[in-house]
Amino acid sequence: MAAAQRLSVVDEIFLRTHRGLGTPIALQGLWRTADRVDPELLRQVHAALRVGPLGRRVIRPSVPGARRSWRANTRAYSLEFTDGTIATEDLLEWADEQGANLDPEYGPGWRLSTAALNDGGSIVSLTCSHALADGRALVLAVDAALDGPSLTTARANASLGRETRAPASDWSDARRQWSIVVRGTFHALRRGIPERPAQTASTRGPGLSTRERGSVAGRVGVESAPILSVVLQCRAPDWEAAAAAQGGTGNSLFITLIAKMLWASGFPGETIDASLPVDTRDEPRVDNDLAMTEITIERTDTPATIREKARIAYERHMAGPGGMPEELLQVIPDRWAYALSKGAGERDILCSNIGTLPDSLRTLGPHRCTGVAARAIHPGLTTDRLPRTRLSGYLCRIADTYTLAVVSLDPVHIDAPETLRALAHETASALGLPISLW
């Protein structure tokens, strides 16, 4: 594995959420196969993942102001096989459980697991802490692991664009960070005292101590938040035809679908604010290489009007706290950084378009995949820390199929799996999308 790299501002935001300073997030890839997956094949994939770019953990700096860094970590959870079989209608509930006890700082930060389905197939899950990777990065890591059990560290580093040079010392990095922060703060103050960052509506309480790492679930007197999910599939030609018929694109139809699902659930607002992640990588890297932008959607909007709003939004990204340099968040204590950035990327809905997946993910060895999905889950989320976000959607395309995973964080309006499934089916039908549900 390459020498240690420094964490980005986004990496550290997700690291804080792991500690209870924000909404806990883990990324998950899911594969459904038509038949039982060979255990030996999965052991080979697991071995490749251990020495791949997900095999790392966070190291604290020795100098104040220096950024945290990554260190290779081949310690991993064992490949997990679920006993017996599970019903297909329960597979997402099983998948939700695969995010427990991931730890990007003390490790391991990822888990590979599988279960047999009662339809004769299998479900395979790869889950990792969001501090390790974003959605596109998880895809890249899997693509490398599926390249074969002989995948070497050097090959992984080369193919995923990882650095091989030694990092700067903590002293050098601290000087760089403080220089950026001081210059940026001076320029920001010349334009006037920055406004305090707007706080988003939320039922969350104060964050945990940084020593209280691990899952935030299980605190005395606090209930786990009921997180509901649905995965739907649609033939790509049908999806594109429905989008074109309404003057939109596949992406703007996706955003429209999530917004209309929220309104159909009983959301009272006349407008919906949508958070849109933007992939900022210029080469394939397993990192959190993303920025955020946003649009405001009105009830009268269509895929055509949302297409134009999104086009403009993708040209601008959300700025640092109060106009200050974002590096400020890396040189101040975690609790202060959380207070400054709290809820910064949260809106009423999240629409993450992961893009087209590589063909390597269409099969697991000789086993044909009947479905491939990517999404975020929220292990340990409790009712006192629910975010502003009510619905999150994660869209990807593989071959001639679009797959959309929808996660509900609104237990008031969406209180049962059947409710979410009905919302997805009815809203998709109204938009001319013939879908099937997992």
Image: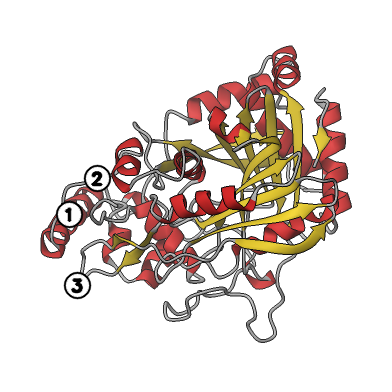
Q: State which tag comes first along the sequence, 3 or 2.
A: 3
The percent coordinates of residue 69 (x first, y second) are: 28, 60
Q: Amino acid at mark 3?
A: Ser
* Dot 1: element: loop
As measured in the structure, the alpha-carbon distance from the residue carrying label 1 to the one carrying label 2 is 9 Å
As measured in the structure, the alpha-carbon distance from the residue carrying label 3 to the one carrying label 2 is 21 Å
Q: State which tag comes first along the sequence, 3 or 1.
A: 3
Pointer 3 local density, CA inside 10 Å: few below 14, some 14–19, many at least 20: few
Q: Classify residue 284 by image quadrant.
A: top left
Mark 3 sits on what residue? 62
Q: Do the CB atoms of the residues marked 3 and 2 lie less than 8 Å apart?
A: no
Q: Amino acid at mark 1?
A: Pro
Q: Do the CB atoms of the residues marked 1 and 2 lie less than 8 Å apart?
A: yes
* Dot 2: element: loop
Q: Is residue 127 visible?
A: yes
Q: In the picture shown, does residue 354 fall above or below 84?
A: above
For the point 62% across and 32% down, the residue is 362
The percent coordinates of residue 269 (x first, y second) are: 73, 45
For the point 26% across and 51% down, the residue is 2
Count of numbered marks: 3
For the point 50% across and 43% down, the residue is 142
Q: Amino acid at mark 2?
A: Glu
Residue 391 vs residue 428: left or right? left
Q: In the picture shown, does residue 312 fall above or below 292?
A: above
Mark 2 sits on what residue? 163
Pointer 1 local density, CA inside 10 Å: few below 14, some 14–19, many at least 20: some
Q: Classify residue 332 by image quadrant.
A: bottom left
Residue 326 vs residue 415: left or right? left
Residue 333 vs residue 98: left or right? left
Q: Which mark is residue 110?
A: none
The quadrant in which the C terminus is found is top right
Mark 1 sits on what residue? 167
